[in-house]
Amino acid sequence: MTAMQPVTIHSRDNALLKDLRRLSQDSTAYRKQGRVWVEGDHLCSAALARGQRPAIAVFSESFWPLAPAEYAQAATKNVVIADALWPDISGLESPARMGFVLPLPVQQELDAQSPTVVLDRLQDAGNVGSILRSASAFGFTQIAALKGTAALWSPKVLRAGMGAHFALRLVEGLDAQDIDRLRVPLLATSSHQGDWLHRAQLPWPCGWIMGHEGQGVSPDLQRRASRHIRIVQPGGEESLNVGAAAAICLHASAAARAGGA
C-alpha cells in the first residue's frame, strides 16, 4: 500500500487549519466538531495500537518525506502543512511534526458492572489525564465524569493521559444520580475519615470516587459510597494531590485483586 498523496496547505485562512487550531486550543471544541486532535508520535502510535482509524493524518512539510509508512498510510486523507504554520495548530511548547484527526467516539451508557473511576468535578486537566492513565494501568475500564470535570477529550487531558483514552470507556457530563446506575461498591476517598487503605479489604470490581481538588468528594457522592477510605500519611502533609491519591488507591485495588487470584 502506498502513501496517500497529500493535500498541501500554505494559507492561514484555510478552513481545515482553522478547525485544527480550535481543536488544539479550545478544550471543548471536540464536542462541536465531533472529532479530536492528537499530536505527536506517542499519542498517534497509541491510537493506532488500540485500533483507532484517523480520518486525517497531518504532517509538517519538512517531515512528510520522512514520515514512517504506518503514519503515512494510516488515514484516508493526508494533509501537509507549511512549517511556518505548524505552531498555529500545536499545543506543545516544542511542536511535534505530525498528528491525527480522529472521530470522537460515540458516548456510551455507563456499564453497571465495570470497574470504574468516578471523577467528581476535577478541574485540573493534568490531574484528570493522570488518573485516566492510572486507571488503564491498574485494570479499571470505565471513567464516569460528573459535570464540572475537565473535558475528557481536551488537548491537555489527552496529552496527560498518554494514550489511556483509547483503552477506556469514557462517559462525561453526568449528574450525581447517574452514578446510581453503577452496581459495583463505591469507595470514596477521604483525608479524615474511613478505613485505612493499607488495612482495607478492597472489593473487586469496584468504583473509586475521586473528588474536587479543593472541596473533595461532594456530600451527594459521599452518601452513595459504601465505604470511605483514607491513605496513611506519616510525613504529616494535610492532603495528597488527587492524581497521586488516585494512583495509590487504584494500585491498591490491583494488588488486592492480584493477591486474591
Image (tube, grey):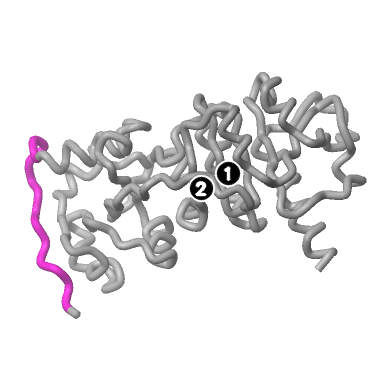
Magenta part of the chain:
2-14
| Left or right: 141 as drawn, with respect to 84 | right
**Residue 16 picture location, percent across and down:** 14, 43
Q: Amino acid at mark 1?
A: Ser
Residue 179 screen position, x and y as percent: 60, 35
**Left or right of 87 in this view: 12:** left
- Check if mark 2's residue and mark 1's residue have beta carbons within 8 Å: yes
What separation in Å lies between label 2 and label 1 (alpha carbons)? 6 Å
Measured from the top left, where is residue 54 in percent x and y?
Answer: 28, 59
Residue at the bottom extreme, as displayed: 1
Q: Is residue 76 magenta?
A: no
Image point (47%, 40%), residue name: 157
Residue drawn at x 88%, y 49% as measured from the top left:
201
User: For mark 2, what is the residue?
Assistant: 161
Where the C terminus falls, by quadrant?
bottom right
Q: Nearer the viewer, residue 171 or 255?
A: 171
The quadrant where residue 258 appears = bottom right
x, y (%) of residue 125?
50, 34
Which corner quadrant holds the N terminus? bottom left
Q: Secondary structure at mark 1?
A: helix
* Label 2 vs 1, first from the N-terminus: 1
Residue at the image point whose x is 60% and y is 40% from the top: 181
Secondary structure at badge 2 equals: helix
**Residue carrying label 1:** 130
Whether residue 8 is situated above or below residue 150 in the rendered picture: below
* Amino acid at circle 2: Gly
Query: Majority secondary structure of the magenta segment?
Result: loop
Residue 125 versus residue 117 in the image, above or below: above
